[in-house]
Amino acid sequence: MPGAPRSADDVAALGFGADYNPEQWPREVWDEDVALMREAGVTVVSLAIFSWARLQPAPGEWDFGWLDEAMDLLHANGIGVDLATATASPPPWLTRLHPEVLPVTRTGETLWPGARQQWRPTSPVFRRYALELVEAMAGRYADHPALVAWHVNNELGCHNVWDYSDDAAAAFRTWLSERYGSLDALNAAWGTAFWSQRYGDWEEILPPRLAAAHPNPTQQLDFKRFSSDALRDHLRAERAVLRRHAPTVPVTTNFMVMAHTTGMDYAAWAGDVDFVSNDHYVHPGPQGPDELSFSANLTSGIAGGEPWFLMEHSTSAVNWQPVNRPKRAGELARDSLTHVAHGADAVCYFQWRQSAAGAEKYHSAMVPHAGADSDVFRAVVDLGRTLGRLAPVVGARREHARAAILFDWDSWWASELDSHPSDRLRYHREALDWYSAFLALGVRVDVVPAASDLAGYDVVVAPVLHVVPADLAARLAAWVADGGHLVTTYFSGIVDEHDHAWLGGYPGAFRDLLGVRVQEMAPLLDDEAPRLDDGRTVGLWADPVDVVAGGVEVLSAYADGEQAGRPAVTRHAVGHGSATYVGTRLGAAGPDGVAATLRTVLDGAGVRSELPDRARGAVELTVRTRGAATFWFLVNRTDAPVDVDLAGEGVRAEALVGEVADGVVALSARGVAVLRVAH
């Protein structure tokens, strides 16, 4: 992957760089750029991401001279190129000639040119022009010595994942035909006996456009699956061209594993790239750093624990949030190294030089508007030196934790559909609350796709695992019987893969495993905040739980409200393991509300923190291993200094980043230490 040695004489190093857009600047700026890149320790840049209009100014007309020069200049300065196919945004001439490539919203509005990603993922016309460009790029640069990877498109689906056009309708029908095989099977899966929706011809089927009432929920869920697959198909089409021209050059595309990106099932996409890449941007708020860690952790889970590439994040402020605050001292390095802790072997930014014009001119960069004489650029240079000291970490896998959080895109999509018990439920927020609780207890946890192998995990938390096919329910039950300790929550186990309710009472597919039954779900109003018998305040949901099996222990009960005296949290001993049900949102008053229940489960499973007592909650520990080498990343989650006394834990360590004195690691506010550890 980029950042790895490009010849036998190179020294393995973490990749470091950014999106580079030389076409935005006069030629004389380019020489300053590469000089500053060398000063910062840049090893790789992504090039030509939004360059289609420059590369092909008109149909059949090509201008590669500037890109040839940029590629040669970068190579001469020892900087590798992750070369984009430039298909992310079509040029104005294409959409003028072919307005039929423009996306259409669910209300029938056209998304016009003037921004970016103004194309339909299912448009055969767009596909033809895009692959023509990819052919030209691949044919010209396949053997260029600067080329270290191909970058397909850019942030596929960021702005155009949901297209309801006639092209999308035709492709949706084809996808459905392949999925179900017959209209009878589709009608059964969609429950079309309800509201007189039975289809007698494939041509009658449409995407879930604006309707008089709530569209069919299984139609909505399938459209989300289809939309993710349509983008994946585009990825595969471009990849096929690139591999034909350059079979040994790795192909990637930048995922967007973060809280607000819901449309792409990246676990399904992982097999279509040679290495996983991700873009991540921090959202302000108390859980911002936790969400960054969560997303990096999930990216590692998607990559199967293998190293991956942080393609984009920000040096400081972004431009697209309601209030765009700059990062505080230490956050540039902490954010970057948290990604490295979770498996990133490259750290890159959007972008190298901050734009003087355009919609992202207020988005920070490695070289800001203030130039090289700035705190941001000095922090960039310092980070480059830090990454240089982490060469021994290159290629290391994330070490398997004893606990995991399951993350499931079907459940994310289905649990937040309309006409549900509550429109306040947020799948990602619930998962993040449990992750924050692990951090608060100082216990390492992996975030993994729901289809992952659970062997080696002692505790698995499956928050709002709403969509549970029979085989997943059976797999989890067998894992519990074999000694695993499962935690799941309200609105879990409710429907099968067709979004049909499991009958017999909630939580449906998990009812026997959990030993509880809920006759009717009980979401809460915004001003309802019942307390548990230990004083914790909960919210959003308060299932009226009945214990229906022997061996069920009530861990917490409601102290007041409509469910006063009834169980809120239960644990069922099953085989050699246990299954815990949480019938309310413990994190309603903050993620610390989850920690008490999680601690009970972890204690029962014998899973404990590897950190000394005083560091738990203040410090995040992440571990990477390569062969016999073990690397500990200690990330200070707080704004105050923290000392981590490893000597008392019997841990011997050599510092790659930071310092160890008499077995104590002194972390500055928002500081990071990286240690080579021997137990």
Image (cartoon, grey):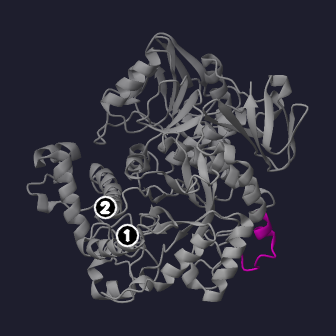
Name the secondary structure under disc 2. helix
Which sits earlier in the primary sequence, circle 2 or circle 1? 1
Give me the residue at 48% from left, 26% from top.
Answer: 545
Crowding around mark 2 (Cα neighbors within 10 Å: few <14, some 14 to 19, many 20+) is few
Question: In this view, which residue lies farthest toward the front?
Answer: 9
- Residue 99 position within the rendered picture, expressed as x and y whole percent measured from the top left: 29, 83
Q: As shown in the figure, which amino acid type bears the numbered disc 2?
A: Arg
Do the residues under discs 2 and 1 have CB atoms within 8 angstroms? yes
Residue underneath mark 1 = 138
Q: Is residue 66 above or below residue 316?
A: below
The magenta stretch spans residue 321 = no
Residue pointed to by mark 2? 244
Q: Nearer the viewer, residue 32 or 310?
A: 32
Residue at x 71%, y 33% (from the top left corner): 442
Q: Position of residue 4 (x, y in %)?
A: 57, 53
The image position of residue 550, as x and y in percent, is: 47, 10
Q: Taking 465 as reference, is 152 above or below it? A: below
Left or right: residue 215 compared with residue 562: left
Q: In which quarter of the image is residue 658?
A: top right
Residue in the image at 18% along x and 50% along y: 178
Stretch in magenta: 367-379
